[in-house]
């Protein structure tokens, strides 16, 4: 899968989706939107004011827009080609993130699933700055794997709540709710 390809929903997407459907409201930022499944779920909720969906891959943004138009949700989602939150001005209630979380494989550089040498570098980068973009009662919904090599203090500065754990054949997936600590 290269930059021209778009990550299609899989177990991790559906794990996160269950909690997006249940929890998000207000202003929502979907980071790494891929095909837009999380953004569309959020945009379909009446208690969501607006959704910003961002992806580094222009093809992903294009595909997410097509799907949002088909679902009649395009007017409720602002799609942006970009990386993480560096471009964001203002604050949101929720950051939804199904990041690339697997360790890089030798000779393969795949943006949709490789989160860096250990797998957790993309998550760590987002979490270092996420609190700057959240409203006071805001939160991050995040999914990652037992194969993700996370820095031991990656959740420092956040109250972390494990919402769900999904055992698979070769790994476990985790969906966590992270709230910045004052």
Image (tube, helix red, strand yellow):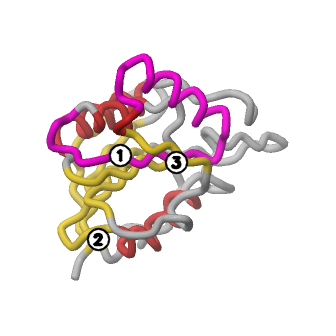
Per the model, the C-alpha gap separating discs 3 and 2 is 23 Å
Check disc 1 and report its element: helix, strand or loop: strand
Between the residue at mark 1 and the residue at mark 3, the CA separation in whole angstroms equals: 10 Å
For label 2, the SS is: strand
Residue hosting label 3: 54
| Magenta residue span | 45-74
Whether residue 101 appears in this view of the structure is no
Q: How many labels, in total?
A: 3
Who's the residue at 23% across and 77% down the image?
181
- Callout 3 environment at 10 Å: few (<14), some (14 to 19), or many (20+)? many
N-terminal-most mark, 2 or 1 = 1
Q: Which residue is mark 1?
A: 51
Proximity of marks 1 and 3: CB atoms separated by less than 8 Å: no
Image position of 2 with respect to 182: above or below: above
Q: Residues within 10 Å of mark 1 (few under 14, many from 20)?
A: many
Left or right: 38, with 125 as reference point: left
């Amino acid at each position: 899968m290269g930059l021209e390809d778009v990550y299609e929903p899989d177990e991790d997407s559906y794990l996160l989706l269950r909690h997006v459907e249940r929890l998000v409201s207000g202003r929502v930022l979907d980071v790494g939107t891929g095909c837009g499944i999380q953004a569309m779920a959020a945009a379909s909720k009446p208690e969501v004011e607006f959704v910003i969906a961002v992806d580094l891959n222009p093809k992903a943004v294009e595909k997410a827009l097509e799907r949002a138009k088909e679902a009649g949700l395009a007017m409720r989602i602002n799609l942006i080609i970009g990386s993480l939150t560096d471009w964001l001005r203002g604050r949101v209630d929720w950051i939804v993130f199904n990041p690339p979380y697997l360790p890089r494989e030798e000779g393969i550089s795949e943006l949709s699933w490789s989160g860096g040498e250990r797998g957790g570098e993309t998550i760590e980068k987002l979490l270092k700055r996420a609190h700057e973009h959240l409203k006071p009662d805001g939160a991050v919904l995040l999914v990652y794997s037992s194969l993700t090599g996370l820095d031991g203090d990656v959740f420092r500065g956040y109250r972390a709540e494990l919402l769900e754990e999904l055992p698979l054949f070769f790994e476990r997936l985790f969906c966590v709710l992270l709230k910045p600590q004052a």
